[in-house]
Amino acid sequence: MREDALYYHKKHPSGKLETVSTKKVDSEWDLSLAYSPGVAAPCEEIYKEKDSVFDYTGKGNLVAVVTNGSAVLGLGSIGPLAAKPVMEGKAVLFKKFAGINVFDVEIKAKTAEEFIAFCKNLEPTVGGINLEDVAAPTCFEIEETLEKELNIPVFHDDQHGTAIITTAALLNACEIQNKKMEDIKIVFSGAGAAAIASARLIQSFKVKKENILLCDSLGVIYKGRARRMNPYKEEFAQDTKHRTLKEALKGADVFIGLSVKNILTEEMVQSMSKTPIIFAMANPDPEILPEKAKKANPRAIVATGRSDYPNQVNNVLGFPFIFRGALDVRATHINEEMKQAAVCALAELTRKSVPESVLKAYEEDTFQFGPDYIIPKPFDPRALLTVAPAVAKAAMASGVARRPIKDFQKYIHQLESFQSESRGFIRIAINRIKARNKTSSTPKVIFPEGAALKILKALNTLVPEKIMEPVLIGEEKVIQNLIEKHHLLTLKDIKIIQPERQSNFKKYAEEFYKMKKSKGVTLKEAQKLMARPNYYASMAVHLKDKDALVTGATDNFRNSVIPVLRTIGTGKRHLLAGVNLVLLKNRILFFADTAVNINPTAEQIAHITLYTAQMVRHLNMEPRAALLSFVSFSERQEENPKKLREALQIIKKQDPQLKIEGEVQADIAVNEGLAQEIFPKFSYKQGANVLIFPNLDSGNIAYKLVQQLGSGEVIGPLLVGIKKPANILQRTCSVEDVINTSVLTALKVHVSRDLSK
């Protein structure tokens, strides 16, 4: 993990952010508009009318994430320079989840006064400020002062983001446990920024202050305590005889942990009310593991900050959408009413029926409001469409909005444009596999190139996910030395085999001989071939000893695919093809064929299209296919347009429900506006997502150009038409490519099992 993380951040270009122009600067005229002399015009307009800065610049969609590195999550006071990767990561989340641009700003500010002065000078530049990883109690003074003195939103996510998600989850947990907010008794473990902000916010929802006990490392915060106190802790000092967390928890309804791992014991859980609510949110290890809390009291509702348990309290459900709503109405502040609106929006969203897209993303039959579903999932796309409008409305109602929204339905449609189909694509696939592994055996995936470092590094990332049981082929000593040398600690127990030393080697050779003796293969030749890793791995999949294989990282495509074809073979259409997934900012495209068929016939193009459409459906998307040519809907008799028209007729007969157009030029296929303008009777309004090329030259050239020159990520090629799950990597593949292909191969195992039922 550490080595992969370092590589991820270091590979060119370094870091996670870059600045991209939103306007073309491709000519002298463009340059004169972007800079001198044209830039003078907007400057003059802004000088005359200050608010026009939002019309002529990016200020209205720009947030500064500011830190001094004094309280970085899990790392402590590491300083501004070391905190920069975290702030860049925060910027990525803003952009990914809400389309907000960010400048990450790490400053050498040791005092609150220095920090405040710097932020005040940022006001002309940005539309809002997100304070991040600033130690308490300084963070309170900084935020309170900036809130008073600036006319842009200021939000300390460590405080209020955590408070908002926690309070939303608490509202729902109390409803499920039949507890009234005004009656519950709450004990906090932790008295830092997040705990105090949460304690303040939950009072807005009828929780009585006298029913809240805060505990820090010294125990209960009580009236008269002298050690390690400050005005913010003093605010919650209670007149109580309790002095320890254990004493405070007796009879308590709610435990909210924002402290350290394992501080909550099973005995403490048993001492709480009969239906306790336990939020153990220390990261990465909670105050108590959910299984231990449930063992202590099966009626407990448990939430953590982790994704591998139900009820993940994750700040990404809050800050991107809160800022989105605040920026879109040009709010001067993020006030209490806006925070409360975010709480209510998230709480209410949890109680609504969950759409199929979210269920499929997590491979669940249902998410139903209840003990294991008290807060929306982080990848629920409805969070943006729910929270941002709620925050915007609250800003308008409370009088801090400078540009009210008139049409909220139109606004929600605009928000949808911020969402990316490709966001979390591989994570969603991993979640699906994990869910299926609960009811079906974990896919056994064999990797013939066991000594390839790219394979080992990829598996070092994947093994902890527990989505597959990998098997490596190669010299055990060589592989173990690589594992040790590169500190690939998760692979220490990975299974490593050598074909000739396996008890099934003779059986595999004899089976291959039976399959190929009519083609002139002798038993001796079969044995020699079976000693080769790709042949052995392919036979393991053919005979169902393994579920799938991934190869190709160290050899060319042809050498890698021949053993697979000779052993596993193709399906009923007797055709193999390669499909590349191109993940762009706002869409996913499927390019086919990019790897196998040099000049396919009309029938082969039809089969390639049908296989690709099937792949798209298995990934829970609707295919919209286009047969690409140099002309659109012509009667020309050249080879490519003619065979595409013939292919179209075959496809329509075999899959009448498939939305497809052809032959059509590429720009018209992918540009829905252009298509509707020129061909109003197009069978789909959105652009095509399945692009079928007339030959291998065009398909291979197209995806490689996109891969090298475009901004999208390319996955594949993935094989379609093969009898059993197998994929061939490119010899130039990266570790990320291996990860992506391996995940999708494991997912295909479950899909294949479904199809065989």
Image: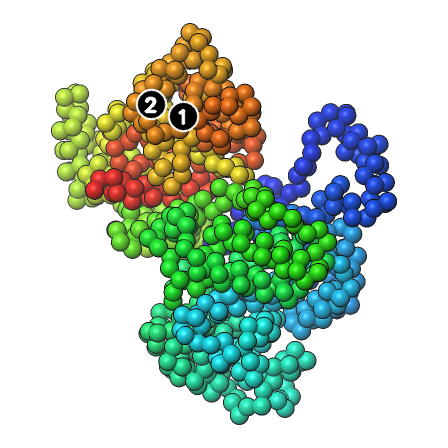
Q: Residue at x 51, y 21 (%)?
A: 679
Residue type (three-letter) at the residue carrying disc 2: Lys
Residue 569 coordinates in the image, percent (x, y): 24, 29
Q: Which mark is residue 652?
A: 2
Q: Marks 1 and 2: CB-CB under 8 Å? A: yes
Residue 257 coordinates in the image, percent (x, y): 50, 73
Counting residues from the start of the chain, the first of labels 1 and 2 encountered is 2
Seen from this angle, which residue lies furthest top?
Answer: 637
Q: Along the horizontal axis of the image, is 350 left or right of 113?
A: left
Q: Which of 144 and 699 lies nearest the eye of the viewer? A: 144
Classify 353 as above or below 253: above
Q: Which of 690 and 508 lies nearest the eye of the viewer? A: 690
Q: Residue at x 38, y 57 (%)?
A: 367
Q: Is residue 449 visible?
A: no
Q: Residue at x 57, y 51 (%)?
A: 93
Q: How many numbered callouts?
A: 2
Residue 133 coordinates in the image, percent (x, y): 63, 63
Q: CA distance from mark 1 to mark 2?
A: 8 Å
Res 401 quadrant in image: bottom right
Q: Regarding mark 2 in the picture, which secondary structure is present there? A: helix
Res 195 quadrant in image: bottom right
Assign the C terminus to one quadrant of the image. top left
Q: Regarding mark 1 in the picture, which secondary structure is present there? A: strand
Circle 1 Cα neighbour tier, 10 Å, few/some/many (<14 / 14–19 / ≥20): many
Seen from this angle, which residue lies furthest front?
Answer: 406
Residue type (three-letter) at the residue carrying disc 1: Ile
Residue 85 coordinates in the image, percent (x, y): 60, 54
Q: Residue at x 19, y 27 (%)?
A: 525
Q: Which mark is residue 660?
A: 1
